[in-house]
């Protein structure tokens, strides 16, 4: 079986794959537009998803499975994959530890006034009147109660926080005190001291968070976005921040990336901007490859129903 990886892997991960699956032929580190001959014979593609197109899918005559080495699916050519009946899986879960730690660290930085303390240090200013706040007893509303959201809830519980989650089914999820469906968004927003969006990019989530929804938030509440930038109407968020409706926003994702230098977010004191790195860690690729290897065993055995993170292409996630 021919397997093409456009994901650049360190040498030791390539060696592990070739050692564990010696009967398969791997092609590594090739750009998809440079493998015209190989693509026609390729059965499995390992990719981040951004390099796939409907044209490439059409050329891959023997393609049966695409493994996306990330959780985001918004760049995939869904119609072409559906038409060809290609199995698609992703690396859902690999981000949960770094992204949950990022979220907790940002909540602590804001609660403990790290920005003001850093400014005071630079000014050599000894000021014990800086107000310190606690996470204990606060309520966090997590939009997206999947692997990442659940890990955020688990860590939040360690700080004595109340956890509310939102998902499409309303089913109970471990570490959440309450689960709301989308129609109860207003209720969750009104209860929360921290609102964390882990929403994917779909037609249903596009600019879901607008001025109206930000108006539901409590005074002094914090908004954090680590999901997808287009879930937020950015101009409405700027307005809500300027009017004091939202006290502070921590933004790791944006509608357009990189964030333009003239975007107002850069110059706002009540906004923390980070360059889409909440999920980055040196453990990322090893975790993603562990999922791929487990799935490759099931795939070769014909046990497709046992594979992890199978994507419902019609839903887009």
Image: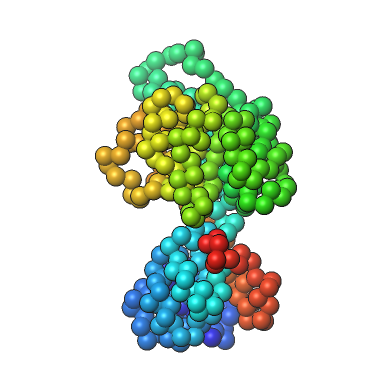
Q: Quadrant of residue 185?
A: top right
Quarter holding the C terminus is bottom right
Rendering coords of residue 88 (x, y %)? 55, 70
Is 155 above or below relative to 54? above
Rendering coords of residue 179 (x, y %)? 68, 43
Q: Quadrant of residue 269?
A: top left
Q: Residue drawn at (42%, 86%), measured in percent from left and top?
A: 40
Q: In the shown orientation, is residue 250 left or right of residue 100?
A: left
Q: Quadrant of residue 233?
A: top left
Closest to the observer: 26 or 152? 152
Rendering coords of residue 225 (x, y %)? 48, 42
Q: Residue drawn at (60%, 75%), measured in percent from left and top?
A: 296
Answer yes or no: is residue 18 visible.
Answer: no
Closest to the observer: 227 or 113? 227
State the scheme by which the image is colored: rainbow
Closest to the observer: 21 or 243? 243
Quarter holding the N terminus is bottom right
Answer yes or no: is residue 198 visible.
Answer: yes
- How many labels, in total? 0
Is 202 above or below relative to 295? above
Closest to the observer: 300 or 167? 167
List the single residue furthest toward the left.
262
Q: Residue drawn at (39%, 15%), measured in percent from left and top?
A: 125
Q: Residue drawn at (46%, 39%), measured in percent from left and top?
A: 210
Rendering coords of residue 71 (x, y %)? 53, 58
Q: In the shown orientation, is residue 316 left or right of residue 120?
A: right
């Amino acid at each position: 079986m021919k397997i093409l990886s456009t994901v650049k892997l360190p040498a030791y991960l390539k060696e592990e794959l070739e050692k564990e699956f010696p009967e398969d032929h791997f092609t590594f580190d090739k750009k998809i537009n440079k493998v015209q001959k190989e693509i026609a014979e390729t059965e499995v593609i390992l990719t981040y998803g951004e390099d796939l197109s409907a044209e490439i899918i059409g050329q891959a005559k023997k393609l049966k499975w695409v493994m996306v080495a990330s959780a985001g699916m918004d760049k995939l050519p869904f119609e072409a994959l559906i038409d060809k009946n290609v199995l698609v899986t992703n690396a859902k879960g690999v981000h949960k530890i770094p992204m949950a730690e990022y979220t907790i660290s940002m909540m602590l930085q804001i609660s403990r006034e790290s920005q003001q303390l850093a400014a005071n240090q630079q000014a050599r200013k000894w000021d014990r009147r800086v107000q310190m706040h606690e996470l204990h007893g606060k309520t966090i509303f997590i939009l997206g109660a999947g692997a990442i959201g659940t890990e955020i809830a688990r860590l939040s519980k360690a700080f004595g926080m109340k956890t509310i989650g939102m998902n499409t089914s309303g089913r109970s999820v471990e570490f959440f005190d309450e689960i709301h469906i989308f129609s109860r968004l207003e209720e969750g927003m009104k209860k929360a001291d921290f609102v964390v969006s882990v929403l994917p990019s779909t037609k249903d989530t596009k600019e879901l968070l607008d001025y109206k929804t930000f108006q539901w938030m409590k005074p002094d509440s914090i908004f954090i976005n680590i999901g997808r930038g287009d879930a937020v109407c950015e101009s409405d968020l700027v307005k809500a921040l300027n009017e004091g409706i939202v006290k502070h926003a921590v933004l790791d994702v944006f509608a357009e990336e990189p964030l333009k230098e003239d975007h107002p977010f850069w110059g706002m004191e009540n906004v923390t901007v980070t360059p889409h790195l909440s999920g980055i860690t040196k453990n990322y690729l090893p975790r993603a490859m562990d999922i791929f290897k487990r799935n490759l065993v099931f795939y070769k055995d014909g046990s497709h129903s046992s594979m992890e993170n199978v994507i419902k292409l019609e839903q887009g996630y």
